[in-house]
Image: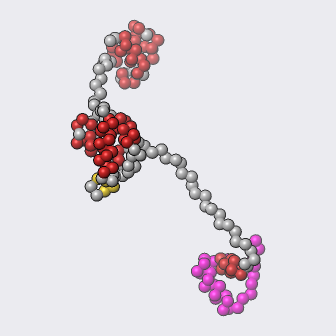
Amino acid sequence: MGRITINVSDELESRINALALELGSKSAVFLAALSVYRTDIPMGKKKAKASPKKKPTETKLGTGNRPKGIKEVEEFFRGRGVPEPVAPKAKLFFDHYESVGWRVGNRVVTNWGACLTTWQQNHGDWRPIPQTNDKIKVSMDAFLKWEKKEHPEWYAKHRLIENIGEVDEFYIEQYRNNNS
């Protein structure tokens, strides 16, 4: 685009300079003036700004200020290890918070799943049952002796491992099945 030169009076020049300070540049002044005086030109549509696309976030069970329903509470309770029967416990929990508008004191619940922790502290029968490990304890030495005798092809793979925790569970299960 070429440069346009316009001869103007000193008074007009000072008005243009004042507007330029206000609008940011002399070009902005002239463009604004043209848009007002050239009404024969149709206004163009504003271009919509492209908003950055948000990836759909997967909501975790137990998040938000309230569950979608009693079934969601039951599913969450089972995932947190609440002992059976889960359904009546979930109903008691859900009904309580529904009755108080999903509030704790005067504050709105922001993460309903966290409320379960308090209920588990206050109701001993809601706490997860600790898992007992009735399986045979495996020592690395005993495992390697058995493996060397029963599966020499596996022994070559495991003989340099020092910690039984580094051995794949498949091999340990085979050991337990043959030594129970």
Quadrant into which the C terminus falls: top left
Magenta range: 1-27
Q: Quadrant of residue 5?
A: bottom right
Quadrant into which the N terminus falls: bottom right
Q: Quadrant of residue 129?
A: top left
Colouring method of the image: secondary structure
For residue 106, say whether it is visible. yes
Above/below status of 139 relative to 70: above
Residue visible at 69% across and 77% down in the picture = 35
Q: Quadrant of residue 105?
A: bottom left
Q: Is residue 52 magenta?
A: no
Between residue 178 and residue 95, name the one nearer to us: 95
Above/below status of 21 relative to 81: below
Residue visible at 65% across and 85% down in the picture = 16
Between residue 22 and residue 120, name the one nearer to us: 120
Above/below status of 95 relative to 171: below
Where residue 44 appears, as percent x and y from the top left, is: 70, 68
Where residue 114 appears, as percent x and y from the top left, is: 33, 45
Question: From the viewer's perspective, is 153 left or right of 21?
Answer: left
Where residue 122 appears, as percent x and y from the top left, is: 22, 42
Between residue 20 and residue 45, name the one nearer to us: 45
Residue visible at 29% across and 27% down in the picture = 131
Where residue 46 appears, as percent x and y from the top left, is: 65, 66
Q: Is residue 5 magenta?
A: yes
Question: From the viewer's perspective, is 117 left or right of 28?
Answer: left
For residue 80, say whether it is visible. no
